[in-house]
Image (cartoon, helix red, strand yellow):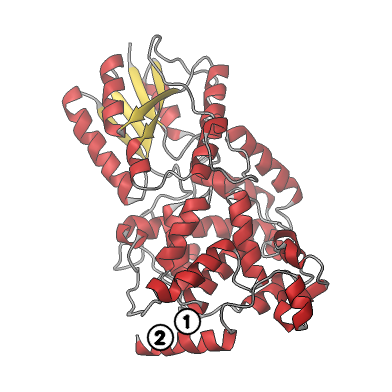
Amino acid sequence: MAVSVVLFTSDLRLHDQPPLRAALASADEVVPLFVLDRGVREAGFDAPNRRAFLADCLTDLDAALRERGGRLVVRSGRTAEEVARVVTETGAAEVRLAAGVTHYAARREEALRSALAGLDCRLHVHDGVITALPPGAVLPSGSDHYAVFTPYFKRWSRERLRDPLGAPRAVRVPEGLASEPVPARADIAGTAPGLAPGGEREGRRRLLAWRRAGLAGYEDRHDDLPGDATSRLSPHLHFGTLSPGELVHRARSLGGPGAEAFVRQLCWRDFHHQLLAARPAAAHADYRPRRDLWRSGSEAAGDIAAWKAGRTGYPVVDAAMRQLRHEGWMHNRGRLLTASFLTKTLYVDWRVGARHFLDHLVDGDIANNQLNWQWVAGTGADTRPNRVLNPVRQGRRFDPDGDYVRRWVPELSGLPGPAVHEPWLLPAAERARHDYPEPLVALPEALDRFRRARDIG
């Protein structure tokens, strides 16, 4: 009886699941396998918020498989070793998985090929599962990737995406195959108190609700900080409980400016994945090297600590940083302005901020997190690397009545309207009553420091 192993990684779903559907078509029995990879923890990527969300995803995936007569097989250890062990136990003739773009994913695939070489077992790697369009599917003349978003988006938009696949009706798993218990969120300590639930069912519920109520207004409201009008689907895209290709199809089927703006954001995700696939070192090294004289050591330590704690003295920055700690998530506009504040106002290396985000973000994704940080810091794909986001202007524009700030910075909740964005303008006696810090640096001084440093660099 033919057996196929499907190694789930960043595609924890049954809908639009090409490796699983191909395995069901080619084998009598299928092993849906997830390996709790020891290497992920050793690499420092095993943050509590993502572990908790992953536990939800695996619990939901196991339940969905059981509804179809199957189950999820969970193992712990080195991925290649555990897959080879399952192949030996079942006599599987093939292993299927989704292609990744990180250096870690490439090394995992290489280790799998090596481990399976002596077992008479084929490895099939499926493109276009964790992105809408596979990295490298479209290329500019004379290069192995697009370095600027706009021409990539124009080319990407002309490509026909594959049609989404439905979920299978039945999955038959070999009997007697050992599995560890599916991890539970309740067993994971140190998670954010407001962390959202994970799993494909939750992702599809959120998608349908937002598609009905939020998508049409997305173009006008996606930067609205207090309105919280984004889809909040990024954790589901990171863990693959939702298919990016299916999201593009669903948005395009509705049409309109909101759908077009949302598809553009999905293309940004693909853009960063194709960039990282071509330049894996960009996960930790400047994509466009500059001779930046980043502030570091004791000179910057206090400012970095204040930034992480949401105590910079700039309310909209602090509100976003506190949202991150409470929810393990941050509004996209908040990500842009907090990153700009750290790298350009405080002039601290983008890697410091990217690491902090990866320690907390439930959607902490190497391609999107690292390359968005580089985009803001001026070392990435931004065509205007010297732009600086003014936190006061950003607050007044995207939180005009101050409701977002008051939600996350309660010590300023008594300040009316937009005055909350400049508490240092209050009389000294009133400022003292609010227990809120003075600004770490004056914005004109910080801007002058940034410009001088860039001139030197």
The amino acid type of the residue labelled 1 equals Asn
Q: Is residue 24 above or below residue 230?
A: above
Disc 2 residue crowd, few under 14, some 14–19, many 20+, Cα 10 Å? some
Q: Position of residue 174 (x, y in %)?
A: 39, 12
Please state if 192 lies on the left or on the right of 84 as rendered: right
Give the SS element for disc 2. helix
Q: Name the disc covering residue 386, or none.
A: 1
**Residue drawn where x is 29% and y is 40% of the image:** 108
Dots 2 and 1: beta carbons under 8 Å?
yes
Figure check: 300 above or below 187:
below
Q: Nearer the viewer, residue 218 or 361?
A: 361
Image position, residue 41 (x, y; %): 37, 41
On-image quarter of the N terminus = top left
Q: State which mark lies toward you, 2 or 1.
A: 2
Q: Is residue 194 above or below residue 218?
A: above
In the image, residue 380 lies at what x, y percent? 41, 70
Q: Which residue is mark 2?
A: 454
In this orientation, which residue lies closer to the viewer: 354 or 21? 354
Q: How many marks?
A: 2
Residue 4, quarter of the rendered image: top left
Spatial separation of the CA atoms under disc 2 and disc 1: 8 Å
